[in-house]
Amino acid sequence: MIIKVLGPGCMNCKTLERRTSEAIQVLHLDATIEKIEDFEKIASYGIMRTPGLVIDEKLVLAGSVPTVETLKEIILAHRSMA
């Protein structure tokens, strides 16, 4: 599983990256987290507000910073669909 955190490096983006990492650790999943800060790459996912979260090239979140619990639900929901 490849998870990308999209954002220019603001506090919300850093928080989303940290919480995503926590969620992955709690779930004991084998996943790679990448931070994407390039504006052209971010725009290529079609988001208007950062931060964004992409799992296996599917945009699953944009413009908010959910709790670790909510991120766990999002990740597990994507995993069951894959």
Image: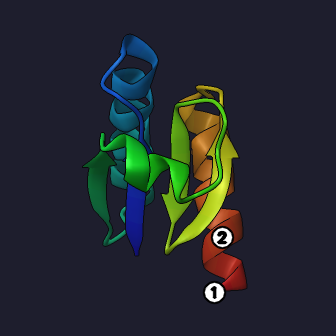
Quadrant the N terminus occupies: bottom left
Q: Which image quarter is the C terminus in?
A: bottom right
Neighbour tally class for label 2: few under 14, some 14-19, many 20 plus, Cα within 10 Å: some
Residue at image location 60% in from the left, 75% down from the top? 79
The quarter holding residue 3 reads bottom left
Residue occupying the far top of the picture: 11
Residue identified by numbered label 1: 82
Image coloring type: rainbow
Q: Is residue 49 left or right of residue 9?
A: right
Contact between marks 1 and 2 (CB within 8 A): the answer is: yes
Please name the residue that numbered disc 2 is placed on. Answer: 78
Instruction: Residue 17 in the image: state x and y as whole percent.
Output: 36, 36
Question: Which residue in the rendered view is the most extreme toward the bottom?
Answer: 82
| x then y, percent, for residue 58 | 61, 69
Front residue of this view, candidates 47 and 75: 47
Q: Label 1 neighbourhood size at 10 Å, few (<14), some (14-19), many (20+)?
A: few
Task: Give left or right: position of 39 versus 38.
Answer: right
The image position of residue 53, as x and y in percent, is 53, 49
Q: Disc 1 residue type?
A: Ala
Circle 2: element type: helix
Residue at image position (55%, 42%) is 52
The image quadrant that residue 41 belongs to is bottom left
In this view, 65 is above or below 57:
above
